[in-house]
Image: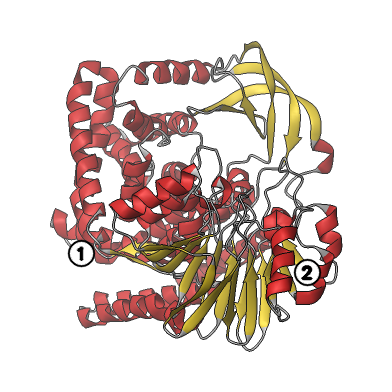
Amino acid sequence: MKKLKILLSYNIILIFLAIFTLLRIVFIFGRPLCENDKLGEKTISGTVKSIEVTEYNTKILVQDTLITVKTNDFKLGNKVVCKGEVSEAISQSNFYLFDYQKYLASRGIYYVMKGDCEVKGFSVNFFYQIKNKMIEIINKNKSRAYLKAFLLGDNKEINQSVKKSYQLNGISHLFAVSGMHVSFFFLLFGKIFKKERSKNIILFVFLLFYLFLTNFSPSVIRASIFFFFVKIFSRWGFSNLQSYAIFIMVMLWYRPYYLYHTGFLYSFTISFFLLYYSTFINSEKNYWKVLFKISFIAILASIPIQVETNFSINLFSILYNLIFVPIISQLLFPMSFLVFLLPFLDSFYCFLITLLENMSLFFMNIPTHIVLCHLNSLYYIFYYGIIFFMMHKIKEKEYKYIVILFFLLGFHFYLPRMNSSGMILMMDVGQGDSTLIVYPYQKLKILVDTGGMFSNRSISENTIIPSMHAHGVTTLDYLILSHGDFDHVGEARNLLEKVKVGKVFLNSGNDTEEERKIIAYLEEKKIPYEKISVGTISRKGIPIQFLNSVKIENENEDSLVCYLKIKNFSILLMGDSGHFVEKELLQEYNLPTVDILKVGHHGSKYSSSLEFISKISPSFCLISAGQNNRYGHPHKEALENLQFCDTYITSIDGAIKIKVGKSMRVTKVR
């Protein structure tokens, strides 16, 4: 009876802590992320806490501001004075994709700046000197990308294609310093120090230093500090799970934005499951059986997070973890310390890394991953309910219930294909155009234009394909390229490399250099294509009309003009065509009223004439334009002509989605 009262009192404490933590999270999320008086032209002084170097720029962290600077002449611990324009980080602008602003907030960074910084001195903190020396030593090694990943928790230098393969194979967590890596130190110090007290003190000091090295990554905080949390709270009678719950609430109280950190979600969710099922795991003595159980539980626990962040899972993840976990945890991670201390081992270490990368790239090309669309929160709660039920049955050795998971994944996979509504999705691709059109039951899937910017960022890999996957679209029936300007077709070849396309349509006007490259690629890969300006194409009984008969040597006015219907609602996509084409359309066709208009030429003053808009009388007008673009799109003249239409602009609203069923429903990101 006494134990029951103690247990109840501990649970009451946990409930109160949970309520207070939840209230704090609601309070913090209800406030603006940035304070207006800290924005604008400012001078910031402080210590350089981290440095991010790419081939394009250098970013340094000072106070709570990430500053883009012109040179790479900085070291950790530098005292600097920076002058420049402080602004908010770019927030999410496409449905369900990466939110840079919230990611920075999860790291305690709330502002960004472009400016000039001057070094005024150096911090007295000797930890910075140690870390700078470590970075200097690491940079001399050919294997520096992996040494930084394992020793400093920085995996940014790992090749992007290889990193993508780790992600698709479900093993990317092995390259983020976490519990698996920290447990190595527990074992190491346990072998060296026999006295419990001495071991704990030295281990605590070392882990604090290691936290500093890894920039206080949430997963490392969880793995490092939780060990001592258990030590403290177990003396007061708390179980490991209760101590873990308290620890999570302390971290979220300190920084609620950790909820937007993918590493935090993975680390804490998987660790909770492993703790909850620790008795089941430890019932085995065989190493491979224990490893299989850990991998199986970790994969199950991470499925909803994997779906939410990557929109796919690998059905062979458990097998791949069985292969890669021993290689990394027992060979490559421990050996990274040896390579750091004994640089002559670097060549051999690079050889092992090359083998690892080639294995991962090989496995990536085996089609074992499936794309799963984004779901709302209630579905994920249902997912975890099924996972707990299934684990309960597996503990009782009723393995047949594993089939429930495959039914659930199968249902999830086919869910978009059971959707009776159509969709028009104008993605935010900056100063460019890309619109995804999906008919009910995915009967027809069309992408009109691919966007394309002169930058190091691939729009197709970072925006278009993830947006397609988030909505359960994996292939395209048609790719329609309205005209040859780079901001409309610049990503076409990148997209065609990664997405299966039934047929490509281009306008029949003069080809630009980019269009010639696309045609050469299509012919090389034997992808069907057709040049068209006027006419009707049909697939599965669904007609699409091309209306532009203008023959003029002007790339914008050569744009394909597409007219189509989803259910009883009509859509007109104008490409970059302007007043000249609009006038021709009015003369040549008895245009009906249009429900959805993709406004021509990004809403420039040379498009959307009052006569044309009055004739087609659109209900919804969509404009794709980049934030602060140099052209000033959309122009006020066009906006005035569109004043009786519900107008949405990607530079303001982010991506725009219209669901077409019995009626039309518009949602936007911002």
Residue 445 on image: x %, y %: 46, 72
Residue 165 on image: x %, y %: 31, 49
Residue 565 on image: x %, y %: 58, 81
**Label 2: how many residues lie within 10 Å, few (<14), some (14-19) or many (20+)?**
some
The secondary element bearing badge 1 is classed as loop
Identify which residue is drawn at 80% across, 63% down.
Answer: 609
Check disc 2 and report the residue beneath it: 612
Q: Quadrant of the C terminus?
A: bottom right
State how far apart marks 1 and 2 are (Cα): 74 Å
Sequence-first disc among 1 and 2: 1
Residue 232 seen in the current view: no
Identify which residue is drawn at 80% across, 52% down.
Answer: 635
Q: Amino acid at mark 1?
A: Ser
Residue 565 seen in the current view: yes
**Label 1: how many residues lie within 10 Å, few (<14), some (14-19) or many (20+)?**
few
Colour scheme: secondary structure
**For residue 528, above or below residue 587:** above
Check disc 1 and report the residue beneath it: 283
Identify which residue is drawn at 51% across, 67% down.
Answer: 6
Residue 424 on image: x %, y %: 59, 71
In this view, the residue farthest toward the top is 121
The nearer-to-camera label among 1 and 2 is: 2
Between 516 and 207, the residue placed more toward the observer is: 516
> Which picture quadrant has residue 403?
bottom left
Along the horizontal axis of the image, is 553 left or right of 265? right
> Which picture quadrant has residue 227?
top left
Between 82 and 271, the residue placed more toward the observer is: 82
Q: Amino acid at mark 2?
A: Phe
